[in-house]
Amino acid sequence: MGTYESQDGREAVSAPAAEQAQAPTRSVASELWDWTKSIAVALVIVILLNMYVFNLSTVKGHSMEPTLREKEWLFVNKFSFLIGHPDRGDVVILKDPDMQSVDRQYLVKRVVATPGDNVEIRGGKLYVNGEAVSEPYTDIKIEDGDRGPIIVEEGRYFVMGDNRHQLASKDSRTFGTVSEKAIQGKAEFILWPPRQMGGL
């Protein structure tokens, strides 16, 4: 970097050095404000993703055994039902229809019948539209007795737990069909523990 000599013979400060010396130093407050804005934007994005795209859910209870075990972590896709509808076989998270308080609990169940379907439980087997349903995800016949036939109303779904032992699952056999609005998302993966990790 070159220097410049003044007319009186003394060495003058180089032009770039002078500019650096005059540049204002960024204040700590300004740095903190930038960090605050970045964190706020990140939080808003996380909240929006949690509300409309995905979230994580922990299994409580035994109503979905043997498919799901207590304390397993599930990846729940919420976006899929914003652009589509639940289908037979989907494992879904829904608000408990029996609870009227603001702090309502959530249930994990399997959709076994969709709007317009005729559902019947007879002789320990599930029938939809007159045909016996193959259910490889269960390990026992339905023990809670015969039900139906029931026609699933428009905009509503019939859900059951995979655990078909007597009184093992609180589902549509107890509280009836559930509205599509009550269904919060589709459980797609088991994330934890690692030995159980995989798709549903």
Image (spheres, rainbow, N blue to C red):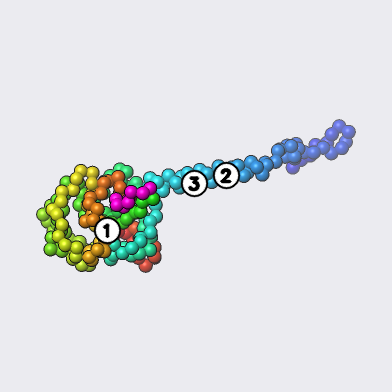
User: Given the image, on which type of amino acid does mark 1 rest?
Assistant: Lys
Instruction: Name which of mark 2 and mark 1 comes first in the sequence.
Output: 2
Q: Which residue is mark 3?
A: 43
> On the image, which quarter does residue 32 sit in?
top right
Q: From mark 2 to mark 3, how far is it between C-alphas?
A: 11 Å
x, y percent for residue 34:
59, 42
Q: Crowding at label 1, few (<14), some or many (≥20) Cα neighbours within 10 Å?
A: some
**Mark 2: which amino acid?**
Thr
Q: Is residue 134 visible?
A: yes
Q: CA distance from mark 2 to mark 1?
A: 45 Å
Residue at the (32%, 43%) spot, across then down: 82
Residue at 80% of width from left, 38% of height from top? 13
Judge whether residue 65 is colored magenta: no
**In terms of sequence position, does the residue under pointer 3 or pointer 1 come before the other?**
3
Q: Is residue 176 left or right of residue 29?
A: left
> Alpha carbon of mark 3 to alpha carbon of mark 1: how far?
36 Å
User: At which x and y percent is residue 143?
Assistant: 19, 65
Q: Residue at x 26, y 64 (%)?
A: 168
- Nearer to us in this view, 198 or 73: 73
Q: Residue at label 2? A: 36
Dot in front, 3 or 1: 1
**Closer to us: 117 or 41:** 117
Return the x and y of residue 20 as percentages of the image width and height: 72, 39
The stretch of residues the image draws in magenta is 93-102
